Image: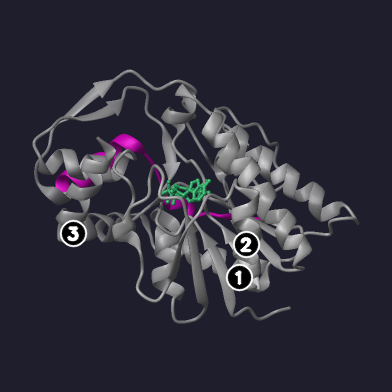
Amino acid sequence: MDSYKKIIVTGHLGFIASAFCHMYKNKYEITGVDFNGHGSMIENLVDGVKDIRADISDTDQMKSLFEEIKPDAIINFAAESHVDRANENDLGFWKSNVLGARNLALLACENNIRMVHVSTDEVYGDAEENNEPWTENSRISPKNAYAVTKTAAEMMLQAYCNSSKHNLDVVITRGANTIGPRQFPEKAVPKAIWCFNTEQPFPLFRTPAKRMWMYVDDHVTGIEAALRLGKKGETYNLAPGFDSEAITEVVIEKIRSIIGKGIINKVDDRDNYDLRYWMHAEKAKNDLKWEAQYDLQKTLSSTVNWYMDNMDWLKAANMHFK
Ligand SMILES: NC(=O)c1ccc[n+]([C@@H]2O[C@H](COP(=O)([O-])OP(=O)(O)OC[C@H]3O[C@@H](n4cnc5c(N)ncnc54)[C@H](O)[C@@H]3O)[C@@H](O)[C@H]2O)c1
């Protein structure tokens, strides 16, 4: 099937899936499934999206959902996604990120529909300064418990795709570090915007870490292109241009200068701290006809402007977080 109408989007109360719903609510008939866990906000619900409260790791709930909706495709965004929390206790990460993906994959097989699985560049681990940018064939070497669960899910889905019993029609995306509207303030950028606006010091890890900073709208257009044009069993890096790479300190300083105030405190690095993710997205450009549209400056100004215009959202998110 090359055109999809009715799709299930998991994790629609979170950051990236809610951006997807905003962008594609008129193109697809979307049913969102979320258990309203960490990182989710009911305020992120998009008008016109059917809202189901359920846990993707619950087999019975997912079975009834598929029976009720009869989707043409599923996009799995739902995941436990914060490295610090995974370092403390990764059990829930295995449940959501691996068992949840397994449930959805088996139902996708049974119903003979496409599954797009949203994964991450963190599966590659840490890039050295002189490394070539990662391609989809680069070594997989996750360094933290979150990334390990994302890797485990990818491998399981590939096995289902390759087995003649399952024959899963899966496409996997590996997105770069993403920022933009509605990101939970446990992540660096919204946290910095909150701290700078409330005269609290922003805790910045002492060792400089490099990231490619991708705007969330670019990430979701890549995922949608993967749904339409991705080849069965293939994995696609989704990354912005190379000049969107910057150390966190530079990004936080730029945010401080856009806001015009703020205090930064250097703190000890977290455990399992990857210092660099570095990849290119040539395959997505060729196969998916996708390319990121935002450069670093536009990514940062669009992100900061949204939060400055939506301080009530940030305040509410910060209350959840505490
Ligand atoms: N944020 C990034 O920089 C980034 C980069 C690359 C890939 N990703 C991937 O994108 C996806 C979305 O990330 P995000 O940053 O939007 O995360 P998020 O934490 O903002 O949202 C995740 C959502 O999934 C829901 N969820 C988690 N477990 C669930 C379960 N068992 N059942 C139902 N709902 C569940 C949560 O309640 C939440 O609403 C994740 O798969 C993540 O690995 C994120």
Question: Magenta segment, which residues?
Answer: 236-257
The residue that label 2 is drawn on is 64
Q: Is 265 positioned to the left or the right of 32 in the image?
A: left
Regarding mark 1 in the picture, which secondary structure is present there?
A: helix
Disc 3 element: loop
Quarter holding residue 313: bottom left
Labels 3 & 1 near each other (Cβ < 8 A)? no
Which residue is denoted by mark 1 in the rendering?
Answer: 68
- Quadrant showing the C terminus: top left
Q: Name the side, left or right, on which 198 lies relative to 144.
A: left
Query: Which quadrant does the N terminus fall into?
Result: bottom right
Residue 73, image x, y percentages: 64, 69
Q: Which residue is depicted at the point 16% across and 55% down? A: 312
Residue 163, relative to residue 204: is it above or below? below
| Label 3 vs label 1, nearer the camera | 1
The amino acid marked with disc number 2 is Ser
Residue 13 position within the rendered picture, expressed as x and y whole percent measured from the top left: 40, 56
